[in-house]
Image (tube, rainbow, N blue to C red):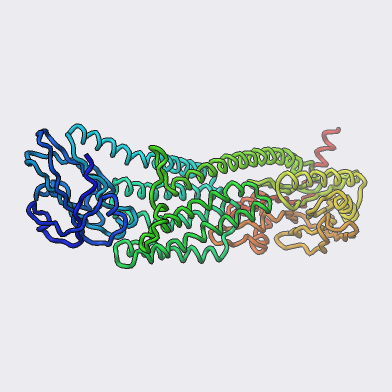
Amino acid sequence: MSLADGWRVRTGDNPAFASQAFDDSSWQTTSLDADGKNIEAGVRWYRLRVKLPETRQPLALLLIGPAGDFEAYENGTRVPGKEIRSLWHVYRDHESVVQLGDIGSELQLAIRVNYDPLLVDVYGFSVDKVLLGSPRAIESERRLSQQKRISLYYSSAAIDLGAMLVGIGALILFSLRPSSREFLWLGLYLLLNAVNWGIFIGIMEGVFSPFMNMFADPLTYIILIFQIEFTYAFAGKRITRVWRIFEWMILPLVPASVFFILGFGPVNLYLILETLLVLPVAVILPVILLRWFLGGNREAGWLIVASLLPSLAIALTDTGTFAAFFGWNGLLFFARPISVGAIGFNFGDLANLFFLLSIGIFMLLRFIHVSREQARGAAELDAARQVQQRLVPPSLPAVPGFRIQTAYLPANEVGGDFYQVITQDDGSSLIVIGDVSGKGLKAAMTGTLAIGALRTLAAENLSPADLVTRLNRQVASAQDGGFITCLCIRLTADGRATMANAGHLSPYRNGAEIPLQSGLPLGLAPDVEYSESTIKLEPDDQITLLTDGILEARNYATGELFGFERTSTISSRSAEAIAQAARAFGQDDDITVLTLTFAPADAMRDQRLAAASER
């Protein structure tokens, strides 16, 4: 039997109101269903006299209402376990069964309710139902009520669990690809959002007290920052200064939210402020995503609506919350679950569900895209390394009158360093070292084309200046952007070195830079004429040729470059020693070193040995 009607009600507090003998005839009459909708905060008493049937049988009472928000009295005796507690220990509706003993022919019920504005106006806290009946019937009603109450949050729990799993998956993807920071921010966003809504659901269901809002509300602002970071990382763009300022404006609300929740400030003002700060994220970020989508970023389309919903859900929930303070009862549904049969949803659930579906598609597309790019990059790197092997010969011919040493230390990424030693018909040797601008397969292919043209021209026994001039024309006609630096030296057995430079680093002689007139790098202009210089070497003189991988070696602890001074200091060492010194400093590019030491005595000895072997 439902005991919803016929209650006497009075605002105020007096222990005598619990007495069975108290005269409540002057009190107003109300219904529990109607009275809990729109009343003032404070203590309120309800009294009801119930005539019991003459046929005596065991009876039980079912009270459905928030635990910690009301006290119940049976014939002047307080029902055990039903007591008013502080705000932070009030839970959502619970079912309490009271077994009635021998109470005679009349039952006097009294209920003392503590109406708190934050709980009553927002969540409709009141004594929802009072049922009287046999213990079996009351137990059946209790189970039915409990099942219905909990089932309203099954969908929320499932969506939260899904968000948590997707968040963990995103963090795993970030650990596998640290460069993809969008997975980091997405994982943090989903995990914290799941925790936040989990606390909210727990408060609604009665697992947690409203005290847990001290943890959930601050998380709201951290989640907003993660959403902003994710959106820009997703698009591969730097966050604008305006958004950075906005993030710094949000951070003070993390401790401020606790201040308001503890009652040190007007909650309605705080909720309005929270809504005003959430709305820019809810509205402006989708507009930015739409602009990126129209600009050609098709993936952004999946997040336009999805990014709107989570923040909008927070704003709408806050709207429903502070609407209660202003009596806007038509907006209260924003803060309450929506029942669809036995399943319940709230705006946060629907927003998170749609967001998860969109994010799932996004993660799949982004994973496929990144995997394809990595496969394409790996294939290109492998092809580039195969081509690069042609740029650096595995063995070199003898250079009459000279001892030659080489050192080549490739960087992780394929570069365009190359060198060649070509024997001429007149017995001289052509030494060419160069560096193609750019990285990867394109640089390696350009270097290969340059070497092919170089070997063709070398067969004509051109002077270094003429060779570089004609090589520049061929490179300029075939090159699609970029350029090549190149240094060409012709060596004769008597120690004569003739050099032409096309934008390359000058060589060193015994630790001192050789002054050369340097022309433009190859490929920039087809009509450049290059000049040449000739020097006469003394026995044991060493010429050192190198690429800019030496100069640009970088100490990452200090940011300092190896530079010209250090290069000059070590330039008289062996090729291997120079290369290793630069690598130890901090290799950032391909390192190539050739040293040419004039050794006429060695040449004469080789000639005598060759003549002796012929005899």
* Furthest-right residue in this view: 460
Whether residue 195 is visible here, answered yes or no, is no
Total marks in image: 0
* Residue 7, image x, y percentages: 20, 51
Q: Nearer the viewer, residue 349 or 135?
A: 135
273 to 347, vertically: above or below: below
The residue positioned 18% from the left and 37% from the top of the image is 133
* Residue 39, image x, y percentages: 28, 59
386 to 117, vertically: above or below: above
Q: Is 285 left, or right, of 547 in this rendering?
A: left
Q: State which quarter of the image contains the N terminus.
A: top left
* Residue 48, image x, y percentages: 16, 49
Which of the 4 quarters of the picture holds residue 155?
top left
41 to 187, vertically: above or below: below
Q: Nearer the viewer, residue 261 or 412?
A: 261
Which of the 4 quarters of the picture holds residue 393?
top right
Q: State which quarter of the image contains the C terminus.
A: top right
The residue positioned 46% from the left and 47% from the top of the image is 190
Q: Is 411 left, or right, of 465 in this rendering?
A: left
The residue positioned 40% from the left and 64% from the top of the image is 253
Whether residue 402 is visible here, answered yes or no, is yes
Q: Is 521 left, or right, of 555 in this rendering?
A: right
Q: Nearer the viewer, residue 111 or 485?
A: 111
36 to 354, vertically: above or below: below
